[in-house]
Image (spheres, rainbow, N blue to C red):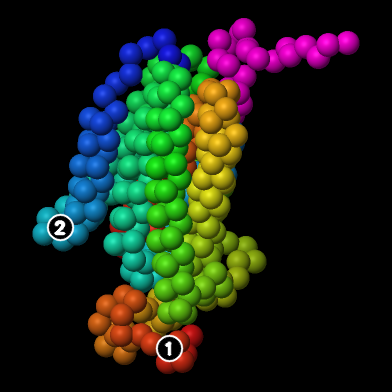
Amino acid sequence: MAHQIIATGRSRTGIPTGRLAVWWVIGSEILIFGGLIATYLLNRFNHGPSWSVEAANTNTFIGACNTFWLLTSSLFVVYAHAASERRDAAKTRMWIWLTILLGGFFMGFKTYEYATEIHHGFTLFTSNFWSFYYTATGLHGFHVLCGMVIMAIIAEGDIKKGRNWHRVENIGLYWHFVDIVWIFLFPLMYIAK
Amino acid sequence: MAGHKHPSYLKIYITLVVLFIVSVVGPEVAPAFGVFAKPVVLLTAFGIAIWKAYLVCAYFMHLKFEKIYAPYILLACLSLLFVFFFGTATDAMFANGHNWVKPVSEEEATKEAMARSYVLNKDKHGDDYGNGHDSGDDHDH
């Protein structure tokens, strides 16, 4: 019996299945990161002075650089999406790999920042602030890493072979969400001191 | 979402970068605004973050051109988040109550934070973050 694909589209929503799934992933991520940020805010309101002193030790320059890398990578991934709609494999792969490169910059800066902070004695167990800092930025960094790996698989496994073009848009949506999370983490951890 | 005309991504990006610069500079110059310093920080840091998030959602994620179900999904999850937040905030914001044990006072926690602060003890540690620091042996925290 031939295999019949039945879930390529959702007639009720008019949204392709893959993209609809990504929207649901993003919805669940809103609860994960939103919950972390909300808890951070509650603690910040309750422990204003001590948390301000702790937050003063985060490196705003590195945080700002990382914001810039992610903002620029968001532009690159949207260019990759536009190129995929034109079925231009070379351009699509180029923009995807440039996005991955900026993701690499982000991870590199983050690694240096973690190393410096740990060297200065600020670890996951130093205080509540640092626990939140490492949990939120660590979880975010993990998402960046996952996005980079998935993008590499799409560029080399799909686009190079001229198939599954819609995946570029799907991973783009995820990447933009990761950027949005950082847009909120940046002022919370680095600006509001 | 190939059925709509793409917005100018470069224009959106430039707007985002300008907003990002304002969000970094704003809190730095906020003290000059005296009594309005706090609102300036909130507006430039968090107000702009919301604006930036809107631009990314609307134009980079094409939410403005997506079928209405996608915003519904996101808004439903966001609403659920607010239910969780306000459901627990009313209790969590209280720092007293029956059988309440507070292991460390805020004053004590602030003192501890100041003692281990790298920025506040620059003269002990070096001139800048990451500089003048060759070993971790001088830390007693």
In the rendered image, residue A157, in percent from the top left (x then y), is placed at: 60, 34
Q: Chain of mark 1?
A: B
At x 23% / y 30%, what residue is drawn? B11
In the rendered image, residue B83, in percent from the top left (x then y), is placed at: 55, 37
The quadrant of the image that shows the C terminus of chain A is: bottom left
Label 1 environment density (alpha carbons within 10 Å; few <14, some 14–19, many ≥20): few
Whether residue B31 is visible to the viewer of this picture, yes or no, is yes
Whether residue A129 is visible to the viewer of this picture, yes or no, is no
Residue segment shown in magenta: A1-24
A89 displayed left or right of A9: left
Sooner in the amino-acid sequence: mark 1 or mark 2? 2
Does residue A15 belong to the magenta stretch?
Answer: yes
Does residue A8 belong to the magenta stretch?
Answer: yes
At x 37% / y 12%, what residue is drawn? B4
Taken as a whole, is the magenta stretch helix, strand or loop?
loop
Q: Quick check: do tags 1 and 2 share a chain?
A: yes
| Location of residue A47 by image quarter | bottom left
Give the numbered dot on residue B29.
2
Position of A111 relative to A182 (above/below): below
Q: A79 or A66, which lies in front?
A: A79
Give the Cα separation between the discs numbered 1 and 2: 34 Å
Label 2 environment density (alpha carbons within 10 Å; few <14, some 14–19, many ≥20): few
Q: A177 or B27, which lies in front?
A: A177
**Residue highlighted by disc 1:** B135
The kind of residue tagged 1 is Ser
Name the element at disc 2: helix
Position of B63 relative to A1 (above/below): below
In the rendered image, residue A185, in percent from the top left (x then y), is placed at: 41, 51
Tag in front: 1 or 2: 1
